[in-house]
Each structure stands twice: as C-alpha cells, then as structure tokens.
Amino acid sequence: MRIEFISEMSILLGASLGLIFLMKYLRLPTATGVLIAGMVIGPYGLGLVKNLPVINALAELGVILLLFLIGLELNPREVGPLGAKAALLAALEISVSFALGFAVGVALAWSLVDSFVLASILSISSTAIVGKTILDEFKLKLTESQLIVSTLIIEDLFVIFLLVLMPVVLAGAGSPTQLLLVALKAAALISIILPLSNFL
C-alpha cells in the first residue's frame, strides 16, 4: 500500500512539475498545467493515479495552505476600502452568470432544478485558482488584484448561501415559503459570519 502510494505521488508530482515548467515556458498560468496533469494521469485518463481518497485529502490541505498564503499577502487596511466596489462587482458577476446559466438550461429544455444547478455552478469562481494565478505573476499587491480577490471572497459567501439552499432545491419538495425561509436562514448565517470575521 505504501509503495503504491509513493509511486502514485511520484507520478503525480512528476507530471505536475513537468507541465508547470511547460506552462511557464509558454507564459500560461501554472494552474492550467496542474489541471491538465490531473486529467491525463487521473482515473478518467491514463489511470496512473487511483488512490483518490488520500489524494482528495491532500488536495484539500493544499487548497487550505494556498488560501492561507494568499491571506498572508493581503493587507486588510488596503483591502478594506475596496469592500463596496468588490460587493458591487460580485453582485454583478453572480447575477449575470446565474441568469445566463439558467437561461441556457431552460433553452436546452432542462428542468428548473437542473437549470438552477447549472446556473449555480457558472455563477461562482475558484478563489484558489485565481489567487494562485495572481501569486504566480507577483501582482497581489496591485489594487486591481486585491479588488479581484476581495470580489472572490464575497462570492465565497454566496457559496454558503447556495450550500444551504441547494438541498431543498434538489429535493424538489420545497414550496416557495420553504425556499424563502431557507434563504433567510442562509442570509442570517452570512450576517453572523461577516462581523465575526473582523475578530479573526
């Protein structure tokens, strides 16, 4: 088991590093190389990496460390004044993406639930991937980059809203009143998290 794990990790790291160097040579985001490596050597590609539970655990740890690193590079005094602009951008991006995603689902004759799921997926961005790209370019100190990261953090709060609402929507048994109640609970949860974040 240990030998198999070490072998898979060696393949994973070797493929990732190789593609990262290639992406840097081509002046493309290094995150792209890691994604390609996962698709090629993963279970849906060559099948060279199969120990998914362990890999998933390590991946979660990696994302946590990456977000922590991004947090270390952010100055709250510089990011704070960007809050209003970030909130406006987040609301605009989420609204447009959600509306387009829902419209595409309806146009494809999908059910309202399936269209809602598609819209939810398209309305959120990956803070880790975008942050990693900005870090690679050494541009996190720029005002524009900090505005982007602040916007993504606000979008992460929207993810909390979706996580609370999604089970009710997928169950298909929620009445408008139930959906409204769940939405209010999610909003209350976010309103509690935001003030507490000032003390962290």
Image (tube, rainbow, N blue to C red):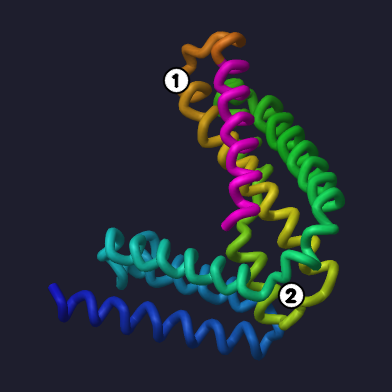
Q: Residue furthest front?
A: 199
User: What whole-number distance in Å separates the C-alpha atoms at marks 1 and 2?
Assistant: 41 Å
Q: Amino acid at mark 2?
A: Leu
Image quarter of residue 38: bottom left
Residue 121 to residue 147: above or below? above
- Within 10 Å of disc 2 (Cα), the crowding (few <14, some 14-19, many 20+) is many
Give the residue displayed 16% in from the left and 80% down from the top.
3
Q: How far across and how far down the image is residue 23, in percent?
A: 62, 83
Residue 104: numbered disc: none
**Highlighted range, magenta:** 179-200
Sequence-wise, which precedes: disc 1 or disc 2?
2
Residue to which mark 2 is pinned: 140
Q: Is residue 197 magenta?
A: yes
Q: Nearer the viewer, residue 62 or 119?
A: 62
Figure quadrant of the N terminus: bottom left
Image quarter of residue 123: top right
Residue to which mark 1 is pinned: 171
Residue 81 to residue 132: above or below? above
| Magenta: main secondary structure | helix
